[in-house]
Amino acid sequence: MGIKDILELVPPELVKYSLLRPDIQENKDIDPTGYNLMRLFDEFSVASKIDINSKEISRADRKKAIAFSLSTKRINWGASFADLLMYYQLYKDWGKVGEILNDKKGVGYLKPYIEKWIEEEFAPEEYSFSFKPTKISENQEAVLAFANRLKKDMKAVEIHNLVFEIAKENNIEANELFTSLYKALIGKEKGPRMGKLIEAVGTDKIKETLLGMIR
């Protein structure tokens, strides 16, 4: 993959950051896989918040902060790249995505990159999906219990933890329940973090969908 191809997938400031971050004697490599570039987006966002003048930061964090300061003056988006990718595949409406994430400028800035990821089928398997309710036959009691315990306005972390609670109460492995829920909601065995996915679709809609498929 050449630099032109990479620049269609990530903004130029991320390329500069990834080249400036290593020590001088280290090889300057960019590993252009979906997983690695998503991690690069996350690290870049974290680096933007590091206080370069702090005496308490580690050498590694100082390197990240310096690389960020040499790459750009400010980050051009607020929401995480993973969230933007997930929300767009759910709604296919950039205006709605910008409104939901309260980051219209950031969404507008990253829009061409996300569209390229989808066009080239570059996203990791977990982030290549659509909301596609599918009837399941396994772990129906646990899925039903999970649906009944969903409440309006639950946060992603609460939803994620609820999966573990329901799995324990029903004497099944948590990964089994996660798999059943992914199959029921997107027709695949894995996807974005369950809490984030359900929060994005809406707990009321997910509850109605799951109950309708099982009852």
Image (cartoon, rainbow, N blue to C red):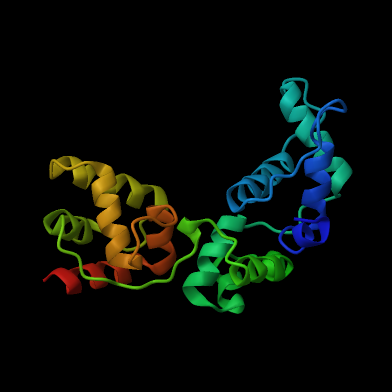
Q: In the displayed structure, would residue 53 be above or below residue 97?
A: above
State which quadrant residue 214 falls in. Answer: bottom left
- In the picture, residue 198 is in which quadrant? bottom left
Of 152 and 66, which appears nearest the observer?
A: 66
On the rendered structure, is 140 left or right of 97? left
Location of residue 58 in the rendering, given as x and y in whole percent from the top left corner: 71, 22
In this view, the residue in front, 167 or 204, is: 167
Question: Which residue occupies 85% across, 46% down?
Answer: 71
- Answer left or right for 176 relative to 86: left
Residue 89 percent location from the top left of the image: 51, 71
Count of numbered tags: 0
**Which residue sits furthest front?**
1
Q: Position of residue 108 (x, y in %)?
A: 71, 71
- Quarter of the image containing the C terminus? bottom left
Instruction: Determine which quarter of the picture holds residue 143.
Output: bottom left
Is residue 21 at least partly visible in the picture? yes
Q: Position of residue 44 (x, y in %)?
A: 71, 45
Relative to 90, residue 58 above or below:
above
What residue is at 82 percent from the left and 41 percent from the top? Answer: 19
- Image quarter where the N terminus lies is bottom right
Residue located at (56% from left, 60% from top): 123
**Camera sees residue 164:** no
